[in-house]
Image (tube, grey):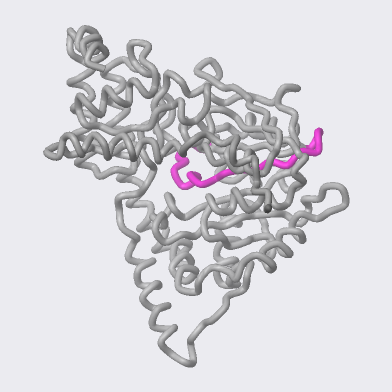
């Protein structure tokens, strides 16, 4: 009898966002007249920009022409897109060769696939609260996971220490779920730590387009020594609305070597073995993101999401609730009022004002007592959710109302 991967038995029963979906589904079944205001899952609500749509249509037309038809694409990415991405980095002051850029079907896929580069005996550091897939992907592989706690006292931005020693270091900045961002000095400390210990940083830069503070790097490769210790994984999902279109990119420097093995060469071998590349049509659309007009148009969409953040932050300021994020990130991480638990607060908002967020406990033990709002919803829904939040939590007798809610539960 075949033996399955028994590490799957170590996973939680279900994924965080599946639990949220089940709870909201049950609520709507009992309350079919209610409309939910969804500030939970980080899916975008604005369509692809015109520049991207035009290139997608053009690419479809190419596939209808014998002269312009494209079959299999290069496994590591089409040269025209790799060149556009390298030029984007050049504007950040980062010089890359085209073969240091790899096109992928999205950051989520790549964050899992990239683990092929590392022995299963290698240890993995996850800064909590953390995107659940970091933990789950390594549990599936049977790796030992080091959980580095962060909290309000350090702004959810811990610095390296002996407790953080591991082979693989996950760093996400701007962070999901907390919205916190590492300054250049803070990120440099992690780079120096990785180089001193021979670790590799998996740098999740999926939200770099939301950075507006000059003290925050858009790429880890802006900093000294990063090319010798880091892999950067990026996405167009939140940058350009590609959540349903799927495209990302990964940067691995040729300088990244461990135990005599060049990780860039290893990833070329991996991709040419395990993939047939991303579709021509999607890559053509993605290339438009990096044009001047494409950047202008997607920045208009990002401004709308940033305005949503301001709406939520103003509501929390009015209520006197502690939070971080929002300025350089599309997520706002808040302390649950009245010492509520995170799932308790989720149920409270769902039942009382039909607002859906994300319980912090779903991002690890350090997330208990915290809650995440996404700013990717529609402007109208975000404004209405903020209004309801203030009305609910700003009432003089809100604590008594909460106690009554607890009793009903």
Rendered residue at 59%/38% (across/down):
9
Above or below 124: residue 248 = below
Asked if residue 210 lies in the magenta stretch, the reply is yes
Quadrant of the image occupied by residue 330: top left
Above or below 82: residue 169 = above
Apparent side of residue 66 relative to residue 51 in the rendered image (left or right): right
83 and 261: which one is in front?
Answer: 261
Above or below 394: residue 128 = below
Above or below 154: residue 378 = below
Asked if residue 244 lies in the magenta stretch, the reply is no
Rendered residue at 59%/46% (across/down):
219
Apparent side of residue 238 relative to residue 46 in the rendered image (left or right): right
Quadrant of the image occupied by residue 81: bottom right
Q: Name the spot of residue 206 as percent of width and height, x first.
A: 51, 47
Screen quadrant of the C terminus? top left
Q: Name the spot of residue 235 as percent of width and height, x first.
A: 50, 53
What span is in magenta?
195-214
331 and 213: which one is in front?
Answer: 331
* Residue most extreme to the right: 260
Apparent side of residue 36 relative to residue 216 in the rendered image (left or right): left
Apparent side of residue 58 relative to residue 409 in the rendered image (left or right): right
């Amino acid at each position: 009898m075949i033996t399955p991967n028994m590490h799957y038995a170590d996973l939680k029963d279900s994924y965080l966002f599946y639990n949220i979906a089940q709870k909201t589904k049950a609520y709507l079944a009992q309350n079919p007249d209610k409309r939910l205001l969804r500030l939970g899952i980080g899916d975008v609500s604005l369509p692809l920009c015109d520049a991207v749509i035009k290139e997608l249509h053009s690419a479809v037309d190419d596939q209808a022409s014998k002269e312009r038809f494209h079959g299999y694409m290069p496994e590591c990415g089409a040269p025209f897109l790799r060149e556009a991405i390298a030029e984007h980095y050049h504007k950040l002051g980062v010089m890359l060769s085209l073969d240091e850029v790899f096109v992928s079907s999205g950051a989520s896929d790549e964050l899992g696939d990239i683990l092929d580069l590392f022995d299963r005996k290698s240890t993995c550091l996850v800064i909590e609260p953390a995107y659940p897939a970091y933990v789950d992907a390594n549990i599936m592989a049977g790796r030992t996971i080091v959980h580095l706690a962060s909290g309000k006292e350090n702004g959810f931005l811990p610095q390296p220490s002996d407790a953080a020693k591991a082979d693989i270091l996950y760093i996400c900045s701007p962070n999901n779920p907390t919205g916190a961002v590492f300054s250049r000095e803070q990120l440099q400390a992690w780079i120096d730590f990785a180089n001193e210990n021979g670790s590799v940083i998996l740098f999740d830069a999926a939200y770099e387009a939301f950075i507006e503070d000059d003290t925050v790097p858009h790429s880890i490769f802006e900093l000294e020594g990063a090319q010798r210790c880091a892999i950067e994984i990026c996405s167009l999902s939140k940058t350009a609305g590609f959540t349903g279109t799927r495209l990302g990119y990964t940067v691995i420097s040729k300088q990244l070597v461990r135990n005599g093995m060049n990780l860039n060469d290893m990833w070329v071998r991996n991709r040419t073995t395990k993939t047939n590349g991303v579709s021509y049509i999607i890559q053509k659309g993605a290339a438009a993101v990096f044009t001047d007009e494409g950047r202008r148009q997607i920045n208009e969409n990002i401004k709308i999401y940033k305005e949503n953040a301001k709406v939520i932050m103003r509501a929390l300021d009015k209520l006197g609730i502690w939070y971080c994020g929002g300025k350089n990130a599309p997520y706002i991480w808040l302390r649950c009022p009245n010492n509520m638990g995170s799932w308790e607060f989720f149920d409270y908002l769902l039942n009382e004002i039909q607002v859906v967020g994300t319980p912090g406990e779903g991002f690890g033990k350090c997330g208990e007592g915290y809650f995440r709002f996404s700013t990717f919803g529609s402007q109208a829904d975000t404004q209405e959710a903020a209004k309801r939040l203030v009305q609910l939590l700003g009432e003089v007798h809100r604590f008594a109302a909460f106690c009554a809610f607890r009793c009903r539960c």
